[in-house]
Amino acid sequence: MPNSFLNLKINTKYLFILQLIVIGLLINNMSLSLRAFIDEIVSLSSNINFWNNGFDFRTGNLNGYDSYSPKLTAGPISALGSSLIWNITQALPSIRIFNFVYVYLVQVVFCIFISKKHNVNFLTLLIICGFVMTSIPWWYGTLYSLGEMISSILFFNSLILFNSFRRSTLILMSISIFFGKFIFIICFLGFYISVLLKEKITLNIFKDAFYFLIPLSIWLLLVYVNYEQSLSSYFSEFFFVFFQQPELTGTFNFSPGSIIKNLQSSEVSTWNISVILRVFLSPILISFLLIKKNVFGNNLDIHLLFSIGFIYIYFWLLNPKKSVIYSQNFTYVTLMLGFFVAFSLINSSNKVNKLISLLIISTFMNSNIIFFLFIIFILFITMKEINLNSVKTILIIFLLVSQFNAFIESQENEKNTYIIFECIENFKFSICNSNGYK
């Protein structure tokens, strides 16, 4: 038995190194081939100026994104890597790559703590995270310096560590909301309602509020110092952007007719079956497992269930656009939890739960051929008793094959060359669509 464990450990190291190489090749190809996306320049322009000019959030004059306007829905943590590398090179491919590296390193730090607190093999966890970060819908938003992935990582990993580091994780959750994507306030409401239901109202609520409000207080101080108008004007604009634009945020109308109309006018009609399985079905399956299977214990399963449930319901019933970009807010944690359950159940006699967890993972395979081969693998290990270490190794190999296939497909993408210096220095739509970002 010791020799078997040692061999698995050595193999896992090699597999991890191989995955890093594949991810590096994939990220390089994607950084060269991603099409122009104006949200990228808005994010880069505002965030580079924020980090490099005394925390002043400016994107030029005579446009809709001046200073601390709430229209900048991606906060400064979305492009920290991009902002750092901007001081060395203004080449867009390098900026995209380094921003992914920054987000990946944040995930690695969380993996260190999660592996210790929840008794998960560290290298295996790194491989899982590397797969998740390059497999969920629109994962390359990280290359565009968008905030969905980094906010998901901060929020949901903090939630998983909540019982061990309550004060620190509340601060990190708050950062993911107020310095990342405000939409995660919905995840927090679901999470904390669950906390209140389990713990009742005690003095903890006041302590929790204190730590949660620290990042918000810092943000409002920055707004007060740098915003060109008053705080009341900022709050007025903020309220309008997030709560008074039904065409963007939706309305609280749960009638069947409204829901059907919402679906018909959204982007869902353009999705292929694999995206529908990932965005619609997989969160339902993981919610079932969180109810039936004790994944983390200590009420964390219920907290995760409420958090995922709140943002999932908002996305499908209220969000008018249903852009696949925003599905990262729950597909990231769905796939992560699918792996946690699958690895904990590989040697279990509970075939139903094992099958469901592996089905979740299967929907994120990169090609139809790999998907069908993975289904055969699932059926085989469900019916047969196989060595635990062998099953885990084969599962990891499937992940690497899927990522390698993504790399092969990315080689077919057309390479693009963009000039962005003028856009960052003086953001204007006219410049960014002609002389600069082209």
Image (cartoon, rainbow, N blue to C red):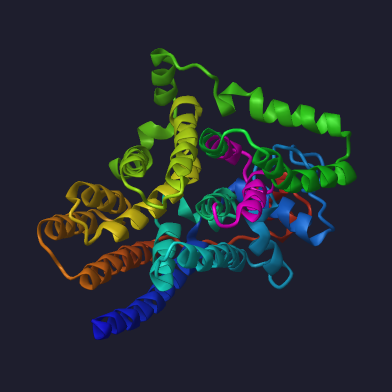
**Predominant secondary structure in magenta?**
helix
**Does residue 387 sit above or below 220 in this rendering?**
below
Task: Return the x and y of residue 199 as percentages of the image width and height.
Answer: 55, 38
Whether residue 383 is visible, yes or no, is yes
Lateral position of residue 258 relative to residue 375, left or right: right
Residue at the spot 80% in from the left edge and 33% down from the top edge: 234
In this orientation, which residue lies closer to the viewer: 326 or 41?
A: 326
* Viewport quadrant of the N terminus: bottom left
Q: Residue at x 26, y 53 (%)?
A: 358
Task: Tell which residue pokes out farthest to the bottom in this image.
Answer: 3
Give yes or no for residue 187 being in the magenta stretch. Answer: yes
Residue 428 vertical placement versus 112 (above, below) = above
Q: Is residue 106 above or below residue 19?
A: above
Indicate yes or no whether the magenta region holds residue 395.
Answer: no
Task: Tell me which residue sits at (31%, 84%) in the image.
Answer: 6
Count of labels shown?
A: 0
Q: Position of residue 340 (x, y in %)?
A: 36, 57
Place of residue 249 in the rendered image (x, y in percent of width and height, measured from the top left):
57, 28
- Rendered image quadrant of residue 209: top right
What is the x, y in percent for residue 279?
Answer: 38, 41
Q: Is residue 435 visible?
A: no
* Front in this rendered view, residue 3 or 10: 3
Question: Most extreme residue toward the left, as rendered?
Answer: 384
Residue 411, placed above or below residue 160: below
Q: Quadrant of residue 256?
A: top left
The magenta stretch spans which residues? 163-190
Q: Name the residue: 31% across, 59% down.
A: 344
Q: Quadrant of the C terminus?
A: bottom right
